Amino acid sequence: MKTKIVYSEKCLGYGTWHIEGPQRVKIAHDILKAKGYGFVEPKPANDEEIFSVHDADYVFNVKKGLAEDSDTPAYQNIYEFARLSVGGALLASRINGFCLMRPPGHHAGRSGAALGSSTRGFCYLNNIAIAVKESGKRTLILDIDGHHGNGTQEIFQGDEKVSYVSLHQSPNYPGTGNFTEGNCINFTLPSNSGGRQYLETLDKALGMVNLAKFEAVAVSAGFDTHQGDLASLGLLDKDYFEIGKRVAQLKKPAFFVLEGGYVGEKVGLDIDSFLSGFEENVKV
Ligand SMILES: [Zn+2]
């Protein structure tokens, strides 16, 4: 059975000039639609859900357009876009779907920029972190975006219910995640290291996790590791199939939340490849 895609075209309504722009998601949506995926519409998250992760002062600043940095503009009504994206992650968690929404979230910490980063890296609210908190489940978060999810690490560092595993390019933004700290398992890879090294590293990282402890898997699904993208690890469509297969082999209910990936055509094909690898190997 095909994984449902959580999507609202409302997420296309801001930031046309930015690299984190609407086309990346619109084109991916069109590709997945043509491939026969079914879509469901999310509702915006409410303040209570958002406060489970973020400080009230920070949320107030996002609402009022007062939180701005060189990567992450204070667009008009950005809070409405951000809370709909959170709502997408919440729905994906409930139906084991794939949230194809923007803005992304994994760089957003409790009160904005995380772990000493100077910016929030196109993120406003941490979609996946809020979905994991709200589920109340013991969750393994696997972050396959090419950048370290410093916000997610900050939020869950030391949390006994959650382990965070990230593979990311180094050196690159945000410069964090250079070593493993407790429940946060980090592996860095050099630019364009290629699929083989990536998958070997992923197997090693997942081998460090006590799977019996977890009830669910949440994937921060970024595709900027694709060859030529912003944090290229030289990955191709077929590598995402293999990553999806490994997620299926964890044998836990899983959901997926889009992070980066800036070339819409590639994002769409990579998501299809990833979900095909997952679906063909999942035992229901
Ligand atoms: Zn990224």
Image (tube, grey):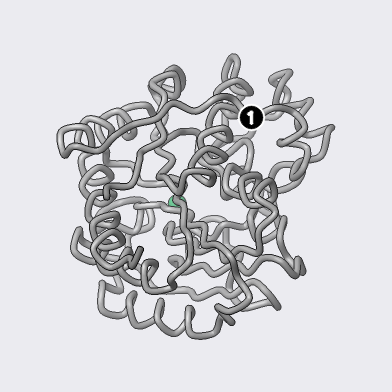
Name the residue: 32% across, 63% down. Answer: 244
Percent of width and height locating residue 88: 51, 35
Is residue 109 visible to us here?
Answer: yes
175, 247: nearer the viewer: 247
Residue 116's place in the image compared with 206, above or below, is above
Asked whether mark 1 lies closer than 8 Å to ligand 1, one says: no
Give the residue pinned by disc 1. 45
Q: How many marks?
A: 1
x, y (%) of residue 138? Answer: 66, 64
**Quadrant of the image occupied by residue 111:** top right
> Relative to residue 254, is residue 266 depicted above or below?
above
Q: In this view, does 257 lie above or below 213?
A: above
Q: Locate residue 135, reporting x and y percent.
A: 65, 50
The answer to which image quadrant residue 233 occupies is bottom left
Going by the image, does 109 lie left or right of 248?
right
Left or right of 230, for residue 216: right
Q: Residue at x 25, y 52 (%)?
A: 270
**Amino acid type for the residue under numbered disc 1:** Ala
Q: In front: 212, or 130?
A: 212
What is the residue that sits farthest to the front in this orientation? 284
Neighbor class of circle 1 (other Cα within 10 Å; few <14, some 14-19, many 20+) is: many
Q: Circle 1 — which element? A: loop
Can residue 170 be seen at all in this image of the molecule? no
Q: Is residue 197 left or right of residue 74?
A: left
x 35%, y 41%: residue: 4
In what quadrant of the picture does the C terminus appear?
Answer: bottom left
